Amino acid sequence: MSKLPSLSYREIVFALQRDGWVVVRQKGSHIRLHKRTAEGVLKLTVPAHKPVKRSTLRRILSQAEMELDEFLKLLR
């Protein structure tokens, strides 16, 4: 398993968009994303911070139902 990187919110949002997530809105320093799946709609919020804390990124990936290695591939 790879180490969790320190990333800006833009890098995180762009990687999630490559996986099919859509930015629905931004209110203040929070960006809301949605993704439709067979089970329903997944929703998550990314804080517009530079950098996003590693613990926050871990929580985002958990809500996105995504493994770290899968996310790291989207960064490239």
Image (cartoon, rainbow, N blue to C red):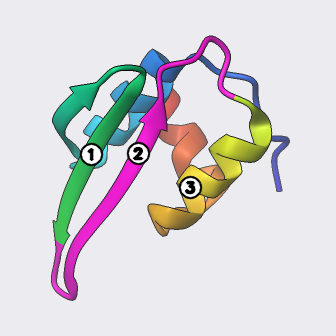
Query: Residue 16 appears at what percent x and percent y?
Result: 36, 41
The amino acid pointed to by label 1 is Leu
User: In terms of image quadrants, where is residue 42?
Assistant: bottom left
Query: Residue 21 appears at what percent x and percent y?
Result: 24, 47
Q: Nearer the viewer, mark 1 or mark 3?
A: 1
Magenta region, residue range:
37-52
Q: Which residue is mark 3?
A: 61
Secondary structure at numbered mark 1: strand
Tell me the number on the disc at residue 45: 2
Q: On the rendered structure, is 34 left or right of 54? A: left
Q: Residue at point 43% right, 17% down? A: 10
Mark 3: few/some/many CA within 10 Å (<14, 14-19, 20+): some
Would you say residue 42 sits in the magenta stretch? yes
Q: Which residue is mark 1?
A: 33
Query: Residue 18 appears at what percent x and percent y?
Result: 28, 38
Secondary structure at numbered mark 2: strand
Q: Nearer the viewer, mark 3 or mark 2?
A: 2
Q: Residue at point 47% right, 20% down? A: 48
Do residues under tags 1 and 2 come within 8 Å of each other at their CB atoms? Answer: yes
